[in-house]
Image (cartoon, grey):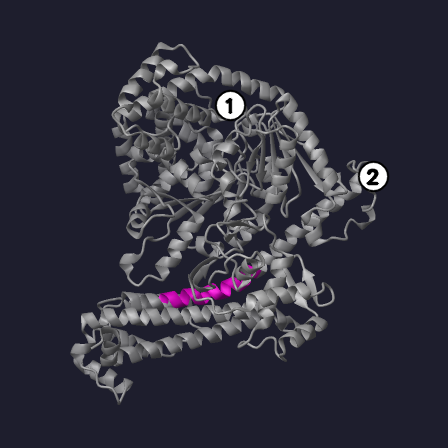
């Protein structure tokens, strides 16, 4: 019998959460017995009725209750998972366009079905955004049976998809994708040369999983759509050689916080003498930029920390996820400088076609929400930048994890020695350990040291391809008995760590082994874990079926189906494999339960951090990998006065405590002083990074304002069907300047593409032609030629986009030097805004003149484009 909300423990009812939510939870639970009597067809009919009533504000509350209750019922039937009270509460928070902080193991993936199903009722589309493609595919496959039973179609966006596939999947009621894929699709849509080539529709509702990773960690990393251009410079090798001759604090001042190097007067003179020039800033011979990038590559960007070398290429490592950022490059020549330093092929430079930041992109959605295990510490930033409130959802069970005080050492050597001792002692008794590192180098040092001590089966997970491919499985099994897992940063986020091991992954592996043996030897040679007659029957049955299928097809099925348990069988073979999976699962549960209890008795999963991060939030993410759903667990950080956080932001802060050469951790009053200083340093760094993001946001807003103006103007050209109207409107709009409001541009756009306005006759055309040019003669037939219009549009858009690209490059260069305005007592943001406005005004005027000239000179265009 299901308990009413009134009987739920006090832990669930939180005074900071509006009682309105609890009233809705009550009503949703009240419908359980009623909905359990409905057939799947009845449920579909009810959903269709909710679609019709979606926009009726008077029924909104009741619609939410009914939609959530129906989704809950279907999840229970199809997945065997019934949303519990705190999950319903989380769904209500997400449905209102807020951030739900839900701890690890609380079932965020299932929670997403509640708001997604309700928001999909309006038919305008729902995007569920995850941080990587694996999670998007996994969640889509797991939950699509719920959505489909409710009558919704579900799509998935993958990197390899072509335009038509993307159009189909974005047209679905609910679409799973990644933040990078949907962002780049938007940028490509903006640059499309035909509306038919666009893949996205209007932005309706978006739910972001791991929302802090996307909206905060990646906030300053813009999505940049670029195209390669020929490598025109041979300056990289010489600049690298020169940079190696420069002396720190004599020729340049290193700035570790911002990863910049400022030349001193001696340094400037030294370079001027080497390059035999009086102007190192000369745009025709810009040696200074090359030397500065070479310096940055030597000082601030380290192999196996910021990047790896893979297939003779420099691959960037995302410092927040520990994963390789595929196809991403540092801009403005820095990437090429690093390639030169590493003696790999220097790749062509790129030119930026278009760019956007995540704050700007996700503001396009009518409603935005997100979920994560760690959001409260960044609540102010979420509210200020995105207008998103954070609601902490109580856990179903009390958290039992113990977060122990840090061990603080003077040196890294002492820190790693103590860390290794702790790991080996846990391994001896069988307690699982997950070690979080911030660099690949640290992870490999720890792994190699453990292997020399006999721990050959420790699992290493970092950005290197040989380790990252099995990321989810490695993390999933890090709670197993005797497991030791070393992972860089937050690799494997989104994967549930279950004490005793994740049984689904175990059975999946066992099933693959069984099928391999069946195809090779037959069931008589199998060493079964049970004497079950039913199991043996299934095995023989499968062997007969396997003989009718190519082994490669069978292997392809096993590789592509992430979760056999939730996959809906399509063939008799798949049905038998599913039955075998279920039997293996049931026969393994008894032994697994014993193992799980043993791990619990050992204290659960132990999390060991090897250094403090720049943000407490990321430290908490690591701690949160332990203590799932009331499980026991512990976390502890091993840090030193030589850690990167100290060296980068304040290398002299611990001077009074250095030089003691004591291998033991600090204790007593020394510990209190050092610990307090570490906390203060981390707090200062958080504020510094926050102010950086805030400052960057102010600059981005200026650029993105003009970006929106430009693409509204471009849309006018793209969608226009009558060249005469085009001419008239361009003339009436000839005085466009940067002070025009976006609202006016949008109004202009709506008028511009209307077929019922500005219906020009021949007399008006004569007036336009006379007004435009006394030297050019254009016939009415030529102007209205559909063929000519399509050709002219293509040419105009190409030239417009080239002008826009040039504008972006000029603005980017000015952004790099605009900070110097502060020395002249000028506000850099005001000066940047003034510069962008002037440049944009010139861009529009130049573009308008170009379009008008192109439309008038029809014969010349024909000669150029058609070869006539």
Tell me the residue that label 2 is attached to: 669
The answer to whether residue 854 is left or right of residue 443 is left
The answer to whether residue 28 is left or right of residue 479 is left
Q: Would you say residue 439 is visible in this rendering?
A: no
Provide the residue span drawn in magenta: 696-712
Residue 83 x/y as whole percent: 43, 29
Instruction: Rate crowding at label 2 as few (under 14), some (14 to 19) or many (20 or more) other CA atoms within 10 Å.
Output: few
- Determine the residue located farthest toward the bottom in the rendered image: 774
Tell me the residue that label 1 is attached to: 7
Task: Give the position of the C terminus as an image quadrant.
Answer: bottom left
Residue beneath the point at 73% across and 40% down = 413
Q: Would you say residue 868 is visible in this rendering?
A: yes
Residue 729 x/y as whole percent: 29, 75
Query: Residue 806 lies in what quarter of the image?
Result: bottom left
Secondary element at tag 2: helix
The answer to whether residue 64 is left or right of residue 858 is right
Majority secondary structure in the magenta region: helix
């Amino acid at each position: 019998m299901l308990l009413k909300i009134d009987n739920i423990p006090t832990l669930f009812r939180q005074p900071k959460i509006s009682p309105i939510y609890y009233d809705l939870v009550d009503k949703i639970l009240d419908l359980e017995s009623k909905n359990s009597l409905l057939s799947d067809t009845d449920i579909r009919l009810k959903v269709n009725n909710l679609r019709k009533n979606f926009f009726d504000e008077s029924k909104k509350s009741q619609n939410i209750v009914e939609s959530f209750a129906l989704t809950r019922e279907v999840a229970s039937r199809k997945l065997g998972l019934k949303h519990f009270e705190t999950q319903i509460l989380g769904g209500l928070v997400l449905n209102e366009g807020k951030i739900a902080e839900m701890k690890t193991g609380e079932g965020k993936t299932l929670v997403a079905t509640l708001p997604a199903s309700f928001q999909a009722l309006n038919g305008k589309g729902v995007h569920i955004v995850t941080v990587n493609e694996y999670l998007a595919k996994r969640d889509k496959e797991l939950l699509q049976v719920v959505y489909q039973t409710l009558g919704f179609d579900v799509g998935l966006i993958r990197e390899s998809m072509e335009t038509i596939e993307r159009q189909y999947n974005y047209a679905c009621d609910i679409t799973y994708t990644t933040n990078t894929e949907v962002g780049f699709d938007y940028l490509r849509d903006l640059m499309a040369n035909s509306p038919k080539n666009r893949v996205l529709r209007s932005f309706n509702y978006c739910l972001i999983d791991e929302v802090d990773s996307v909206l905060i960690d990646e906030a300053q990393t813009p999505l940049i759509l670029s195209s390669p251009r020929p490598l025109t410079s041979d300056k990289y090798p010489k600049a690298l050689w020169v940079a190696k001759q420069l002396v720190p604090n004599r020729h340049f001042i290193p700035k570790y916080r911002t990863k910049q190097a400022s030349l001193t007067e001696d340094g400037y003179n030294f370079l001027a003498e080497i390059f035999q020039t009086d102007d190192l800033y000369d745009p025709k011979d810009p040696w200074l930029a090359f030397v500065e990038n070479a310096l940055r590559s030597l000082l601030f960007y380290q192999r196996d920390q910021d990047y790896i070398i893979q297939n003779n290429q420099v691959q960037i490592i995302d410092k927040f996820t520990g994963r390789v950022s595929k196809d991403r490059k540092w801009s403005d020549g820095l990437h090429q400088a690093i390639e030169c330093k590493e003696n790999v092929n220097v790749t062509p430079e790129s030119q930026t076609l278009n760019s956007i930041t995540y704050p700007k992109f996700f503001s396009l959605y009518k409603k935005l929400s997100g979920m994560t295990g760690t959001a409260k510490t960044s609540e102010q930033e979420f509210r200020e930048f995105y207008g998103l409130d954070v609601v902490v959802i109580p856990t179903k069970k009390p958290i039992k994890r113990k977060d122990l005080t840090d061990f603080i050492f003077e040196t890294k050597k002492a820190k790693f020695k103590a860390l290794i001792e702790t790991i080996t002692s846990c391994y001896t008794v069988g307690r699982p350990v997950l070690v979080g590192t911030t660099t690949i180098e640290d992870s490999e040092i720890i792994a190699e040291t453990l292997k020399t001590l006999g721990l050959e089966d420790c699992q290493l997970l970092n950005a290197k391809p040989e380790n990252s491919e099995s990321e989810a499985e490695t993390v999933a099994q890090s709670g197993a008995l005797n497991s030791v897992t070393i992972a860089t940063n937050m690799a494997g986020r989104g994967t549930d760590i279950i004490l005793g091991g994740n049984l689904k992954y175990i059975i999946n592996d066992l099933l693959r082994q069984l099928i391999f043996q069946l195809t090779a030897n037959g069931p008589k040679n199998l060493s079964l874990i049970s004497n079950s007659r039913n199991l043996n029957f299934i095995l023989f049955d499968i062997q007969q079926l396997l003989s009718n299928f190519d082994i490669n097809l069978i292997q392809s099925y096993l590789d592509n189906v992430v979760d056999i348990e939730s996959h809906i069988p399509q063939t008799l073979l798949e049905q038998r494999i599913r039955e075998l999976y279920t039997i293996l699962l049931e026969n393994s549960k008894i032994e697994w339960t014993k193992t799980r209890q043993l791990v619990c008795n050992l204290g659960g999963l132990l999390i060991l951090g090897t250094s403090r991060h720049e943000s407490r939030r990321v430290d908490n993410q690591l701690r949160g990998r332990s203590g799932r759903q009331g499980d026991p667990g512990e976390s502890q950080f091993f840090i030193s006065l030589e850690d990167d956080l100290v060296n980068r932001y304040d290398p002299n802060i611990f001077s009074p405590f250095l030089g003691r050469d004591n291998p033991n951790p600090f204790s007593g009053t020394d510990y209190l002083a050092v610990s307090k200083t570490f906390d203060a340093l981390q707090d200062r760094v958080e504020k510094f990074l926050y102010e950086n993001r805030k400052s960057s946001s102010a600059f981005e807003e200026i650029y993105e304002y003009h970006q929106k103006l430009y693409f509204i103007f471009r849309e006018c050209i793209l969608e226009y069907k009558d060249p005469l109207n085009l001419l008239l409107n361009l003339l009436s709009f000839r005085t466009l300047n940067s002070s025009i409001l976006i609202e006016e541009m949008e109004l202009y756009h709506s008028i511009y593409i209307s077929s019922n306005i500005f219906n020009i006759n021949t007399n008006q055309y004569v007036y336009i032609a006379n007004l435009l040019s006394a030297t050019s003669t254009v016939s009415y037939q030529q102007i209205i030629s559909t063929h000519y219009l399509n050709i002219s549009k293509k040419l105009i858009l190409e030239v417009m986009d080239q002008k826009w690209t040039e504008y972006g490059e000029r603005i980017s260069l000015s952004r790099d030097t605009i900070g110097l305005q502060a020395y002249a007592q000028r506000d850099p943001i005001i000066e940047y805004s003034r510069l962008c406005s002037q440049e944009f005004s010139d861009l529009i005027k130049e573009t308008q003149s170009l379009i008008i000239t192109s439309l008038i000179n029809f014969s010349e265009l024909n000669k150029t484009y058609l070869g006539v």
